[in-house]
Image (cartoon, coloured by chain):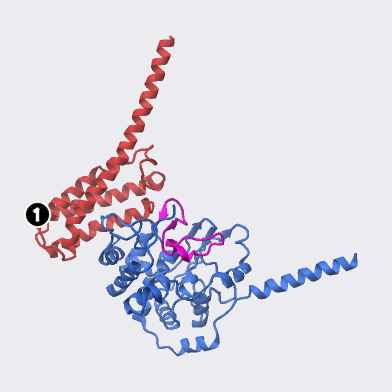
Amino acid sequence: MLRAIVVVFTVIAVVGAGFWLLTRPMRLDQQTLAAMQAHEADLSNGQTLFWAGGCASCHADADAEGEDRRILSGGAALDTVYGTFGMPNISPHPDDGIGRWSLADFANAMLRGISPEGRHYYPAFPYTSYARMTPGDVADLWAYLKTLPAVESDVTARTELGFPFNIRRGLGLWKRAYLDAGPVIGAAELGEDAMLLRGRYLVEGPGHCGECHTPRDFAGAMRNERWLAGAPNPEGDGRIPNITAHEDGVGDWTEDDIAFGLESGFTPEFDSMGSTMAAVVKNFANVPAADRAAIAAYLKAIPAMPDAR
Amino acid sequence: MPFRQSTIAAMIVAATAATAVAQDDVIEQRQQLMKDNGQAMRVLVPMARGQAEYDAEAALAAFVSIRDSALVFGDLFPEGSETGGDTRAKPEIWSDREGFDAAVAAFIDDTEAAVAAAPADLDAFRPVFGAMAQNCGDCHEVYQVPED
């Protein structure tokens, strides 16, 4: 009997230790962080990344327009099929926002999905895409965020998820399986063309387009074999459109149609992009025209895929 | 008496069917109005982007067309027309009627302003056009479901 108890406890201890080891947060190495510290900040580039990264879509007030979209007081809730995610204040306020963070804290959040306290973030915060950003761009974005208004507001919706997603530590395993900073679309499709590679960087990295436009598997990971081919709306009715160059997607759009769509919200038929894409357009209207053109070129170059039937 | 009852029953069936048809109609009507707006935008956008010569007469005709759509648009979302006919109307139109009515009112105001301005040249055109076009995305953001 005693022996059985010892065996049971040993098994539990071993499994527990294994889980603990496999799920521990993997922070950025000192070398990467040192290079970021040495980087000279470019605020204009930081501003481009702020808009391309869509920070305002979740962290600004939903009714905010124009300059007010730079007030990142958080407080909204993202209701998804996995449950509800609360979106925090990321303004530079020292107590309610991220004013006391270091560049290293920010970089670990953006590139590794780890909080300053060493907890895993849920990938509702799209670090699965942001992980593809260059350390220099993350440093520029950090420098830009610090110039935005500090807002006193600690209203954050409670994150409420069902099992097993409610076990935050388990995200360590999920990241081992799915967090991949490598590109989705390789050299075979894009070659060495600088514009296409810029488009890839913006779409796969900061723009995090795949987070909504690519379908997810049972574990909530993006199915890269169906990259940008459209997906159920994670927040409710309808579908998020296919944006590959298939006739089910943007096959009959010109590159100018796509670039203009990102700037104005109008499709070639002059429907106006609605729902969550409306905020994305408000963001992309603020990035340089060359970047919108690069995104358009990339979307026309990646594998065209029909809608899921 | 049995005759009367069956007559009433028939009337109820007929009335229900008529309502269903009418609701399909309003969905089609509002979709048609949106397509008409798209046609008007097809005239206006290339001018705004400098891809077509500015034509004051064509611009005014397009503004009038959109204004006329705006004036009746709000009446095409009666109770009972929430679903059917490929509608992409979001339930928020009915659950947040005040907000929706305010959005339609803002659209009417900006289209009236564009018509009243009857801009003679591109410099006068761009601001009234921009203010009007802003309504499209603002309203779709809250009241339209994404499509595939």
Residue in the foreground of this view, choosing between A199 and B45: A199
Q: Position of residue A54 (x, y in %)?
A: 40, 68
Q: Nearer the viewer, residue A181 or A157?
A: A181
Amino acid beneath label 1 = Glu
* Depth order, front residue of A209/A169: A209
Magenta span includes A96: no
Please tell me the colour of chain A. blue
- At a point 9% along the width and 59% down the height, the residue shown is B120
Q: Residue furthest right?
A: A1
Q: Is residue A222 part of the magenta span, yes or no? A: yes
Magenta-drawn segment: A212-240
* Chain coloured red in the rendered structure: B
The residue identified by callout 1 is B57
In the displayed structure, A121 sits above or below B73; it is below
Which quarter of the image is occupied by the N terminus of chain A?
bottom right
Q: Residues within 10 Å of mark 1 (few under 14, many from 20)?
A: few
Residue A239, given in percent of the width and then of the height, sits at 42, 54
Image coordinates for residue A55, horizontal then vertical, percent: 42, 69
Look at the numbered disc 1 and give the secondary structure of its residue: helix
> Which residue of the protein is positioned furthest toward the top in this rendering?
B1
Left or right, B80 with reference to B71: right
The rendered magenta stretch, by its main secondary structure, is classed as: loop
The x, y position of residue A237, in whole percent, is 44, 50
Marks counted in the figure total 1
Q: Is residue A148 at least partly visible in the picture?
A: no
Residue drawn at 39 percent across, 41 percent down = B83
